Image: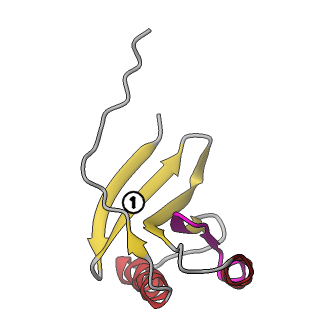
Amino acid sequence: MDYVQFAEINGCEITFDIDIKKPKTAEFSIYGLTNHLNSKEYLQKAKEYDYSNIDFSRYSFTKKIDTRKEKLNSIQELEKILTELTHIVKKEKYEPIPITEIKPVSNTV
């Protein structure tokens, strides 16, 4: 089972996910639509954000942090990274997709 947590930073809802198959990589995602971008703009932005280790899609912005490579010395450093992510998201004029409820995943067969 994956570990997923929700929080709000700078007015943006963020999910925090650790995949059981990649436990050393933490993913922080902000869900929102960027339908106002045309295809060329979208591809340009995706390439631009790839350099910042941000996965950019039509539905989300995801910042991946590999804890083996990036040593965060304090919670303030993580907060700074996530606040910068919220500034990027807001600059792109995304339309938020609210996280309204948590639904448990059933393992029954």
Q: Position of residue 78 (x, y in %)?
A: 43, 77
Q: Camera-side residue: 40 or 106?
A: 40
Residue drawn 37% across the image and 29% down it: 105
All told, the count of numbered labels is 1
Dot 1: what SS?
A: strand
Mark 1 belongs to which amino acid? Answer: Thr
Q: Residues within 10 Å of mark 1 (few under 14, many from 20)?
A: some
62 w.r.t. 103: above or below: below
Provide residue 77's location: percent of width, then percent of height.
43, 83
**Residue at the image position 52 percent from the left and 61 percent from the top:** 27
In the image as oriented, which residue stretches furthest toward the top?
Answer: 109
From the viewer's perspective, tell me whether residue 11 is left or right of residue 108: left
Q: Please indicate whether residue 34 sits to the left or right of residue 106 in the image.
A: right
Asked whether 89 or 20 is in front, the reply is: 89
Residue 80 versus residue 32 in the image, above or below: below
| Residue under label 1 | 15
Q: Is residue 35 left or right of residue 79?
A: right
**Residues drawn in magenta:** 50-62
Front-lying residue, 37 or 43: 37
Quarter of the image holding residue 106? top left
Q: Position of residue 41 (x, y in %)?
A: 69, 84
Quarter of the C terminus within the rendering = top left
> Residue at (53%, 79%) from the top-left corner?
36
User: Which quadrant would residue 25 be assigned to in this image?
Assistant: bottom right
